[in-house]
């Protein structure tokens, strides 16, 4: 959810091809545009900023420093032109047709004060241009990337180097670690803004390779030989009806997919969630049950 607040600033009037310099106008809050691009706006040079504008309770992004050009106090933000980077106004713009969709596209308006104003074509950069804060959603993705989440660390009985029998139970489990079951928490931050995300595994769907699947909401119970032919108490398959010799390669391919729920929160009540699905695979040999008659 974007935080939107009223912004009062002098705008640049367009007369022919020239831009007229705005007067100084400031407000001590955060301003967000339709792209989710947010700027710190300073009430007065040298005062604090960022604490009242939906950001985190630490200064940054230029807040508290004021904006100036060759000794002249200038607006830190002008709607339609963007944020002052010390010599030009920088504004985030949508990607052009067939332009890459990661990173940041922006235009710079220079020469506004005491010169001939001009705008550069839209340019791409991997990181935010000076003064522009990444959105909370973008920081959330950075935090998720730091988690290095994995699909299940598959364990199965019978073991993959052995063979099971048609009709006998299969035990399924995931060796638990922060990256395979969670919870795992990471924070992504830039000066003036941070997002903390936490990931927890909600379920694992085991596709057994014969058209059947099992959904487990626990990591599963490790098998011990003393259990014999008993079924798993929480995550298992009742058994295959056909030997794996009926499959290409002579083995069943088992795919386990973990559904992670990631929740995140940042300043100003900004929150969100998303599901991340990650898979792992193994194979299993199932032999026919031999019946001995006398």
Image (cartoon, rainbow, N blue to C red):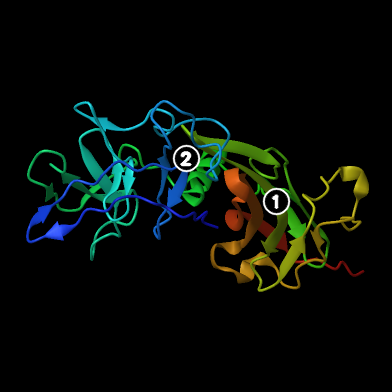
Is residue 226 shown to the viewer in this render? yes
Q: Position of residue 113 (x, y in %)?
A: 16, 39
Give left or right: position of 30 versus 207: left
Q: Position of residue 15 (x, y in %)?
A: 11, 60
- Which residue is under mark 2? 28
Mark with earlier residue (1, 2) = 2
Q: Are marks 1 and 2 in contact (CB under 8 Å)?
A: no
Q: Quadrant of residue 76?
A: top left
**Is residue 43 or residue 226 the one in the foreground?**
43
Residue under the point 35% across and 38% down: 131
Give left or right: position of 35 versus 229: left
**Is residue 161 or residue 231 the one in the foreground?**
231
Mark 1 or 2: in front is 2
Residue under the point 22% across and 26% down: 71
Residue under the point 65% across and 57% down: 259
Q: Position of residue 216 (x, y in %)?
A: 77, 59
Is residue 150 shown to the viewer in this render? no
Residue under the point 26% across and 51% down: 81
The secondary element bearing badge 2 is classed as loop
Which quadrant does the C terminus fall into?
bottom right
Which quadrant does the N terminus fall into?
bottom right
Q: Position of residue 205 (x, y in %)?
A: 69, 62
For this orientation, the residue located farthest to the front is 23
Image vertical order of residue 253 relative to residue 178, above or below? below
Q: Quadrant of residue 90?
A: top left
The secondary element bearing badge 1 is classed as strand
Q: CA distance from mark 1 to mark 2?
A: 41 Å
- Which residue is under mark 1? 201
């Amino acid at each position: 959810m974007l935080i939107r607040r009223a912004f009062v600033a002098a705008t640049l009037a367009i007369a022919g091809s020239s831009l007229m310099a705005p007067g100084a106008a400031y407000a001590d809050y955060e301003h967000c545009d339709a792209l989710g691009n947010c700027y710190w706006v300073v009430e007065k040079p040298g005062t604090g900023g960022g604490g009242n504008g939906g950001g985190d309770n630490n200064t940054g992004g230029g807040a508290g420093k004021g904006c100036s050009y060759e000794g002249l106090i200038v607006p830190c933000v002008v709607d339609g032109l963007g944020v002052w980077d010390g010599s030009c106004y920088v504004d985030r713009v949508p990607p052009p047709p067939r332009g890459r969709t990661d990173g940041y596209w922006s235009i710079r308006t220079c020469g506004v004060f005491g010169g001939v104003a001009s705008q550069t074509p839209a340019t791409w950069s991997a990181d935010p241009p000076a003064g522009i804060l990444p959105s909370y959603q973008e920081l959330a993705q950075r935090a998720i990337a730091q988690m290095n989440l994995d699909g299940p660390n598959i364990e199965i009985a019978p073991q993959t180097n052995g063979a099971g029998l048609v009709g006998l139970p299969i035990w399924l489990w995931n060796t638990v670690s922060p990256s395979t079951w969670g919870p795992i928490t990471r924070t992504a931050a830039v000066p003036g803004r941070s997002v903390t995300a936490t990931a927890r595994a909600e379920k694992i769907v085991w596709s057994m390779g014969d058209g059947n699947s099992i959904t487990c909401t626990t990591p599963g119970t490790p098998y011990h030989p003393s259990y014999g032919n008993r079924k798993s108490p929480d995550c298992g398959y009742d058994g295959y009806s056909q030997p794996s010799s009926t499959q290409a390669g002579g083995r069943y391919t088992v795919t386990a997919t973990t559904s992670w729920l990631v929740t995140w929160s940042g300043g100003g009540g900004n929150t969100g969630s998303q599901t991340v699905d990650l898979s792992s695979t193994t194979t299993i040999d199932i032999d026919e049950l031999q019946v001995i008659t006398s």
